[in-house]
Image (cartoon, grey):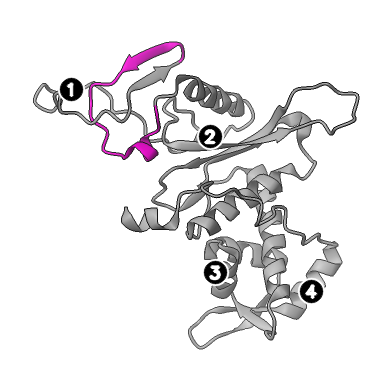
Amino acid sequence: MGSVAAAPSPIGLSSRSTPSPKHANLNVQHVVLGDLLFRTWYPSYYPEEIAGRDIDRLYLFSQNLSLFAKFFLDNKSVFFDVASFNYYLLVYNAPNGTLSDQQPQIIGFFSKEKMSWDNNNLACILVFPPWQRKGLGKILMGISYELSRLEGRIGGPEKPLSELGRIGYLKFWQARVANVILRAKNKTTMSAEEVAEACWMLAEDVISALKEMDVLGTKRKNDGSLVVSKARVREWVQRHEMDLAAPVDEEGFADGYVVEEDYWKRH
């Protein structure tokens, strides 16, 4: 889902521009289109950890997941080459001692580009319809921002957002921003840039949330930065009875779960 780096098309390639398979670095071993499999004849200029590995079943599973999501997301385009994305699944396990003998069930997911030049931390997100309106979307959003923090990269979702996506993200951003502002000690005001850095959010997303909350002050700092009043944020939280508890435990990630920060510096 999203802006996928699709495999180069053979149309228009001359024999001079086609490298010899003997010398090609075939990190992408093949491309799957539905039930058809094509072996590649062109080199991949992405390292193996970006291009993906030769795992047919997971590749087909990711394609089917994207196609299923397309039923509910009109603003997304579907590409069959999913190797440049990671997929994060939300799985329900029935509690012990219940009458249900149900197997673990996938109830939602989000995808994320392995390498995003726009620092997108999420490409496509979907909570399956029977599980919607239970606050599960903010868990997936929270994971995407926690991955950004662990990677050391300020980011946000791929844009443009759908109308429903914008509503969901604004609510998530508002709670995240309010939490950071109210937890800041010895500060009565903060600049939008300071909030963005503390939230690992893009400044434009922080400003969108603050404008929707109507808590931006009329004054600016000497450098022109927008100023946020902590008192107005506290009033807004009380008025809307917002739950500011973090949806994701920062300590809940296993070692090696994300791309290390040093990787991005080396590339």
Residue denoted by label 1: 21
First along the sequence among labels 1 and 4: 1
Q: Can residue 223 be spotted in the picture?
A: yes
Dot 1 falls on a residue whose secondary structure is: loop
Residue denoted by label 3: 197
| Image quarter of residue 242 | bottom right
Report if residue 50 lies within the magenta region: yes
Residue occupying image coordinates x 40% and y 11%: 36
First along the sequence among labels 2 and 1: 1
Residue denoted by label 2: 76
- The residue mark sitting in front, 4 or 3, is 3
Q: Can residue 159 be spotted in the picture?
A: no
Q: Position of residue 15 (x, y in %)?
A: 11, 21
Q: CB atoms at circles 2 and 1 under 8 Å apart? A: no
Q: CB atoms at circles 2 and 4 under 8 Å apart? A: no
Q: CB atoms at circles 3 and 1 under 8 Å apart? A: no
Residue occupying image coordinates x 17% and y 24%: 13
